[in-house]
Image (spheres, helix red, strand yellow):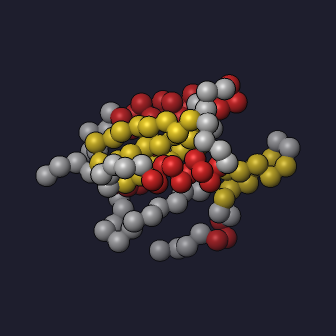
Amino acid sequence: MSKPKVLVCLLTGIERQNWINPDLALLLFNMGRDSRFDVVVAAIKDATPHEVARNRTIQRDHNFDWLVSFDNDNYMPAGTPLDVIASAGDQQSVIGLTYGVKARESEYFLFPPPRMRRKN
């Protein structure tokens, strides 16, 4: 049986403000070495506005089972998205994870907020 194919798209750019978070770089390296999956990483550089960049990740002409999309400043404090995919059921075609977004100067909150998360 073949391994599930995962396309990992990184939304980034060539200027310093778009450089890749070092923790994310390590995460991408570890994802590429995961023996459970066939992982390909692609950079989506300087695509603006943000919705254009995200649409480019979806429109890539590849035969992949899963798409993972990261902004250049994202990271996961533990594990990888591949751990989430490995535990997904047959009916789960889209998975969204919680992440931090800026609320005010030097303050962040989680999106989606904990009260909106489904309990399954």
Q: Position of residue 119 (x, y in %)?
A: 53, 73
Q: On the image, which quarter does residue 47 sit in?
A: top right
Q: Is 91 situated left or right of 43 in this image? A: left
Q: Position of residue 87 (x, y in %)?
A: 35, 58
| Residue 111 in sight in this render | yes
Q: On the image, which quarter does residue 116 sit in?
A: bottom right
Residue drawn at x 36%, y 35% is: 32
**Residue furthest right in the image:** 105
| Residue 75 in sight in this render | no
Q: On the image, which quarter does residue 79 sit in?
A: top left
Q: Position of residue 19 (x, y in %)?
A: 62, 28
Q: Is residue 25 above or below residue 5?
A: above
Residue drawn at x 64%, y 49% is: 50
Number of marks drawn: 0
Q: Position of residue 43 (x, y in %)?
A: 49, 36
Viewer-proximal residue among 13 and 5: 13
Q: Is residue 15 above or below residue 35?
A: above
